[in-house]
């Protein structure tokens, strides 16, 4: 057992050894970490739904599209940091690793301050614009503002995790996240069940836990002096370095923004069906989060694997790892889909005991289930392309599947199914359109991966141009 654990504790140099072994060993801690991170929102939803009620559950869920939209800056910095650091790590360029990490820390501080100020100013107007029901809007504003004020913890945790993964360390973020997750559960129960603080208590518990995980990540970074240097001078951002990080990360940030804007545009459709569907949507997204975790983990692992090997000039190894990693991701998704179809009702029942809410949630989960298999292809191959430096192709694919396919299809489907019995249309349009967009995304991603243009995007072609 000790030998097995030592394998995970070592920093992963993914340019040597069996490609599939290095990918899986690197991915497993990330998968466990993603499960732990998903526990944040899941525990929040369970405790709110059980101790406060379905409307409180709907209030927390109604903020997710806006909150995710406001986080796009951090996503861009995180992805850019991971790609840049992983390629410099593959090239064994200590100086550029050091300055890139320092620049990311500075950019995160600036983005955090801007979001805290701007986000709290526009939270209520945005919720009103999305036609959030009057019965839950005050709770929604309270929850969203607390999360925005404490956003620094989430920002630094995710960005520092991206850096550590780029350096081959996927275990340290896991340890800190597990600690913070258990703390979040304890604080949720204390603030909501004991102190009766409602949705505000859930928000405070999440913010405190995330800030602690960020502090632990910062402490770890100071101890990684065998890989990079960290002094005050490294916090300085040059124009060239900022441009490189933005170039690598902006497309991924824009991709997330597209997803978030789609959620914002779709939110009025959801809200038009009332609090019951809003609450059902929260439950579906929580279960969906767990189902999507293997795909996201494989995607992140493939990004680091591709980045390190492209940095080392080992393209044949990238192709081998991409093929085998994607096949394992598909097999994993088949198992997850089967489990959802078999035990979905039991999972939904954890959040609520309202029969109608359980029936709606299970119906929508059944529609989405097959889509997880197609997403395994999209996430894995997109990860390979991003790691190689081609972050634009996955972005354009997201625009096509979300803006051109998913959103118009949902509105057309809804309009076409309006009847006296269903004045707001068929609620299945919300999730059926998502399933179709996922399948289309997998097909398009596979086509662009096979074309191979991503092989020419590596930053190590001019890796010494930044000093």
Image: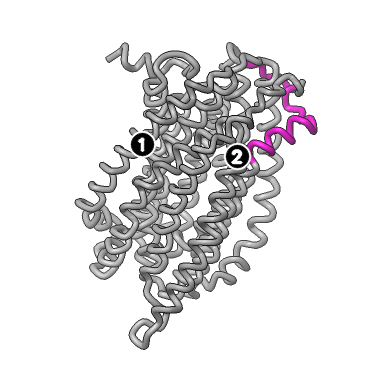
Depth order, front residue of 371/225: 371
* Residue furthest out toward the front: 451
Residue found 37% across the figure and 26% down from its top: 24
Does dot 1 land on a helix, a strand or a loop?
helix
Name the quadrant of the C terminus: top right
Can residue 430 be seen here? The reply is yes
- Residue 35: x percent and y percent? 37, 39
Task: Judge left or right: residue 349 versus residue 237.
Answer: left
Which portion, as a residue range, is magenta? 228-249
**Earlier-in-chain disc, 1 versus 2:** 1
Residue at horizontal 69 percent and vertical 38 percent from the top: 246
Q: Above or below — where is 334 with respect to 454?
A: below
* Residue 365 versus residue 81 in the image, above or below: below
Cβ atoms under marks 1 and 2 closer than 8 Å: no
Residue, far left: 342
Q: Is residue 198 visible?
A: no
> Residue 329's mark?
1
According to the picture, the residue beneath numbered tag 2 turns out to be 391
Report whether 177 appears left or right of 403.
left
- 281 or 454: nearer the eye? 454
Q: Which residue in the rendered view is the most extreme toward the bottom?
A: 420
Seen at 31% across and 58% down, the residue is 365
Q: Position of residue 38 (x, y in %)?
A: 40, 44
């Amino acid at each position: 057992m000790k030998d097995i654990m030592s394998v995970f504790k070592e920093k992963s140099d993914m340019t040597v050894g069996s490609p599939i072994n290095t990918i899986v060993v690197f991915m497993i801690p990330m998968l466990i970490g993603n499960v732990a991170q998903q526990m944040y929102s899941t525990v929040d939803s369970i405790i709110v739904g059980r101790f406060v009620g379905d409307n409180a559950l709907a209030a927390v869920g109604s903020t997710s599209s806006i909150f995710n939209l406001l986080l796009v800056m951090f996503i861009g910095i995180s992805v850019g940091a991971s790609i840049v650091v992983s390629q410099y790590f593959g090239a064994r360029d200590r100086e550029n690793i050091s300055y890139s990490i320092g620049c990311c820390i500075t950019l995160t501080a600036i983005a955090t301050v801007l979001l805290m100020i701007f986000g709290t100013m526009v939270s209520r107007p945005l919720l009103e614009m999305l036609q959030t029901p009057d019965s839950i809007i005050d709770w929604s504003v309270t929850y969203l503002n607390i999360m925005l004020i404490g956003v620094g913890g989430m920002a630094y945790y995710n960005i520092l995790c991206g850096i550590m993964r780029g350096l081959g360390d996927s275990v340290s973020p896991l340890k800190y996240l597990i600690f913070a997750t258990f703390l979040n559960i304890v604080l949720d129960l204390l603030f909501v069940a004991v102190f009766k603080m409602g949705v505000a208590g859930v928000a405070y518990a999440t913010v405190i836990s995330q800030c602690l995980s960020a502090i632990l990540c910062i402490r770890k970074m100071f101890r990684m002096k065998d890989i990079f240097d960290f002094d005050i001078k490294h916090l300085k951002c040059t124009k060239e370095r900022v441009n490189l990080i933005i170039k690598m990360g902006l497309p991924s940030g824009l991709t997330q923004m597209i997803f978030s804007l789609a959620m914002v545009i779709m939110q009025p459709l959801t809200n038009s069906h009332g609090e019951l569907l809003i609450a059902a949507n929260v439950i579906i997204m929580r279960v969906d989060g767990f189902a999507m975790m293997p795909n996201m983990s494989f995607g992140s692992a493939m990004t680091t694997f591709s980045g390190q090997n492209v940095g080392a000039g080992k393209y044949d190894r990238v192709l081998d790892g991409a093929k085998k990693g994607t096949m394992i991701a598909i097999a994993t998704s088949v198992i997850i889909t089967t489990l959802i179809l078999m035990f979905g009702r039991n999972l939904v029942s954890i959040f609520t005991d309202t029969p109608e809410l359980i029936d709606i949630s299970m119906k929508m989960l059944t529609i989405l289930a097959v889509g997880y298999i197609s997403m395994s292809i999209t996430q894995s191959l997109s990860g390979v392309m991003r790691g190689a430096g081609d972050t634009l192709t996955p972005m354009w694919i997201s625009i096509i599947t979300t803006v051109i396919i998913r959103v118009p299809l949902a509105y057309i489907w809804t309009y076409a199914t309006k009847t006296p019995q269903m004045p707001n249309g068929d609620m299945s349009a919300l999730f059926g359109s998502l399933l179709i967009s996922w399948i289309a995304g997998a097909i398009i991603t596979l086509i662009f991966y096979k074309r191979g243009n991503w092989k020419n995007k590596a930053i190590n072609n001019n890796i010494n141009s930044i000093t």
